[in-house]
Amino acid sequence: MEFIIRLLTVFILGAVELWVAIPAGIALNLHPLLAGITAGAGAITSVIIVLMPGKRIRTWLMRNREDGEKKHGRLYIIWARYGAAGLGLLSPLLTGAPLGTALGIALGIPAGRLLLWMSLGIIVWSLLLSFAAILGLAGIAALGK
């Protein structure tokens, strides 16, 4: 039961912020790869949850903007230069998966493309963080010898 609670904790943290979830999973004595997979699954779940009411979110965001043609800001520049792929691969790093998804919806990216690229971005960052943690733990173990 305790193991399930640790997994659920990492899953929920991953839904909120991937960068917090993996170190938390390691602190909870989960293997870094298991922590990464669980956190990634939580982040992808949060993307799906945000995508479900996507058109309503887009309508609400566009209604509450002062200027519908405002074209500046880091994520807009990424979107203009790299498209859905750039936004999906970088937003888990820059803003977190749920906010990146909401911004993708606001930019008008189709839900299927947004889900694909956000999921790929989450998988890439989860793997990179997990392997960095594995290398870091191996380095700490080597120093202890």
Image (cartoon, helix red, strand yellow):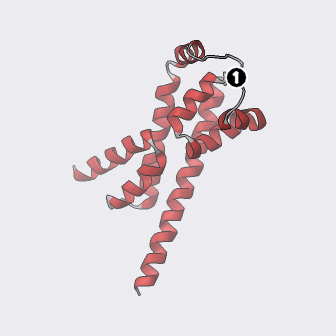
- Please determine whether, in this image, residue 11 is positioned above or below residue 128: above
Instruction: Give the quadrant of residue 120.
Output: top right
In the depicted view, which residue is nearer to us: 98 or 34?
98
Disc tally is: 1
Q: Secondary structure at mark 1?
A: loop
Query: Residue 81: where, in percent of width, then height?
Result: 78, 37
- Please determine whether, in this image, residue 106 is positioned above or below residue 116: above
Query: Residue 7: where, in percent of width, then height?
Result: 33, 48
In the depicted view, which residue is nearer to us: 18 or 134?
18
> Image point 42% across, 57% down: which residue?
23
Q: Which residue is mark 1?
A: 70
Left or right: 8 in relation to 57: left
> Furthest-left residue in view?
1
Left or right: 57 in relation to 25: right
Instruction: Give the quadrant of residue 65.
Output: top right
> Furthest-front residue in view?
66
Left or right: 19 in relation to 55: left
> Image point 42% across, 50% down: which residue?
21
Amino acid found under the numbered disc labelled 1? Lys
Query: Residue 118: where, in percent of width, then height?
Result: 59, 37
In the depicted view, which residue is nearer to us: 112 or 69?
69
